[in-house]
Amino acid sequence: MSELNVYWFRRGKGSLPGNFGDELGRDAVEFATSRKVVWADPASCDLASIGSILNSVSRAAHRAKRTDPLIIWGSGLMKDNVRPLHSSLMPILVRGHLTRSALALDRKILTGDPGIVSRAIFKANRKEYKWGVVPHFTHVKTEALHQWCRDKNALFINPTGTVQEVISKISSCHGVISSSLHGLIVADSYKIPCVWLNIKSHDSHEFKFNDYCSGVGRGPFSKLSLSDFMSFDKDPDTVEPFLFSDREIQGILSSLRGVV
């Protein structure tokens, strides 16, 4: 089969790897379609996947005066105050109800983040750590997170590692604390109790977390501020895991199969 040109967020206009949550889009698309995926810019790609990239993709399509269809599979918005999507964009799956509502999309369009299919792609690791901490890539150098991990013998998981490395480490933990949305989504995929470390990473950063929860029918994440996190000392079994079924995972995968 021919290669599939897919856009996901990368720094340096595609020349520099981003964080694992964005890169996970490549693996999910390859797994769903059995086609080789290559990165392409948003003006010329065949498909856009994981991440809060709908606005930027739509703007790129407008600038390029695009006419051929651009499939959207699992992307979301960064905030709800947005313009309608460019006419070339063809959403078949968006991240959540908040994105779908903000864009006034047909309610028949499915919702969900493809990151939730991680357990179908990567085998879970043996449990070794009580807690793993997954920061947003802008929080990697936050010393308080490193100090807490040293004090609690927790695993600090750098989100700029390879997708397989990061997911292997997440799945080795009994519980996950994360300021990265995809740290939480991958934990959900493996039915690992998780807690949202609510540290601001950009404007309207809470929108995407709430959007994801709405898209998979999940209740709100348990949440910690940075100051609360520093004194946090509970066991993972005090946090209820989200149980996403294999049937629902297959539904997300099936939404793309046969489309590209």
Image: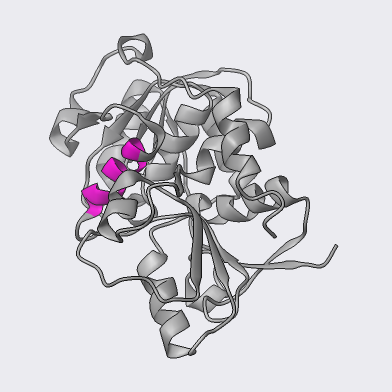
Count every numbered label the image shows and give the total: 0
Q: Residue at x 36, y 57 (%)?
A: 105
Q: Residue furthest left?
A: 227
Residue occupying the point 40% across, 65% down: 54
Q: Is residue 111 above or below residue 251?
A: below
User: Measuring 33% from the left and 59% from the top, which residue is drawn there?
Assistant: 77
Residue 174 placement, left or right of 24: left
* Magenta range: 205-214
The majority secondary structure of the magenta stretch comes to helix
Residue lying at 49% horizontally and 24% vertically, measured from the top left: 244
Q: Is residue 40 magenta?
A: no
Q: Position of residue 41 (x, y in %)?
A: 56, 77
Q: Is residue 30 left or right of residue 218?
A: right
Q: Which one is nearer the viewer's eye here, 44 or 110? A: 110
Q: Quadrant of residue 96?
A: top left
Residue situated in front as seen by the camera: 91 or 149 = 91
Let me know if residue 73 appears in the view.
yes
| Image location (x, y in percent) of residue 14 | 56, 74
Q: Position of residue 87 (x, y in %)?
A: 44, 76
Vertical order, 29 against 210 (above or below): below
Q: Is residue 10 visible?
A: no
Task: State yes or no: residue 207 in magenta.
Answer: yes
Q: In which quadrant of the rendered image does the C terminus lie?
A: bottom right
Residue 209 placement (x, y as % from top left): 30, 43
Which sits in the foreground, 172 or 91?
A: 91
